[in-house]
Image (cartoon, rainbow, N blue to C red):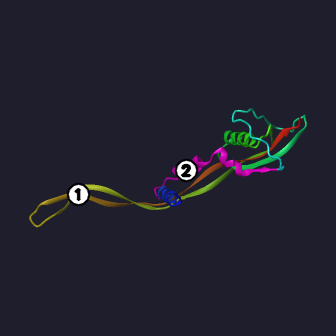
Amino acid sequence: MTENYSKLLHRAFLAGGFGFLILIFTGCASVSSTSMYYFPSTTTIYPPKPKDAPIPILGKSPDRPYKSIGKLTFSTTRGWPFLRDSILYNARANGADAAILRDTNSQQQTRLVAVPPRFNYIPVPGPVYRNKKGEVYYGTTYIPDFQPGYVFPTTWTLTSIDAEMIVFKK
C-alpha cells in the first residue's frame, strides 16, 4: 500500500499536479483522525454519546458545577466547520456533556511551492521510415517537450483551537 501511495504522489508531483496533492492531503483528514490530539485529564472513562447527541460548545466556563475530563488541542488548514465537527466528534467519543473553547488562533502562512522541470513526450503520428523498395511505414514518433520548473507563492490559513471537554456534576 505504501509503495503504491508513494508512486501516486511521485507521479502527481512530477506531472505538476500541486492541486492534486493538496486534494490528497486535505481529502484524507477526517474528524476521527483528530482523536490523536485529545488528551484525557482523568482516569475515569465515560461512555460515548450517540452520534446525534447535542453537545454545546461554550465560550466560557458554565455557571453550574462541572468536571474537566480532557483537552483537544490542534491546528488545521481545513477551517472552522472542520474544527467544530472535530470538537463535537471528540466530545461525543469521550462522553463529554459540553466543550469549552478556551483559545482560538488564526494566522496566514505564505509558502513557496516549487514545481520541478519535466519532459513530456508528445506523440506525433506520421511516416516513420521508407524501406529500400520505397514503401512507407506509418507509426507514432514521440517528440520531447521540455517544460521548465517554476516557483509560486500560496497562502494558507492555519487555525488553532484549545478546547476543554467537560461533564456536568449531578
Question: Tag 1: Cα neighbours inside 10 Å, few (<14), some, or many (≥20)?
Answer: few
x 69%, y 48%: residue = 34
Image vertical order of residue 121 relative to residue 170, above or below:
below
x 49%, y 58%: residue = 4
Region rendered in magenta = 14-40
Please provide percent x and percent y for residue 9: 51, 57
Residue closer to the observer: 35 or 124: 35
Please provide percent x and percent y for residue 73: 76, 49
Residue tagged by mark 2? 24
As shown in the figure, which amino acid type bears the numbered disc 1?
A: Gly
Residue tagged by mark 1? 139
Question: Tag 2: Cα neighbours inside 10 Å, few (<14), some, or many (≥20)?
Answer: few
Residue closer to the observer: 100 or 137: 100
Residue farthest toward the left in the current orientation of the protein: 133
Precedes in sequence: disc 2 or disc 1:
2
Please provide percent x and percent y for residue 86: 70, 43
Magenta includes 96? Answer: no
As shown in the figure, which amino acid type bears the numbered disc 2?
A: Ile
Disc number placed over residue 56 in the picture, else none: none
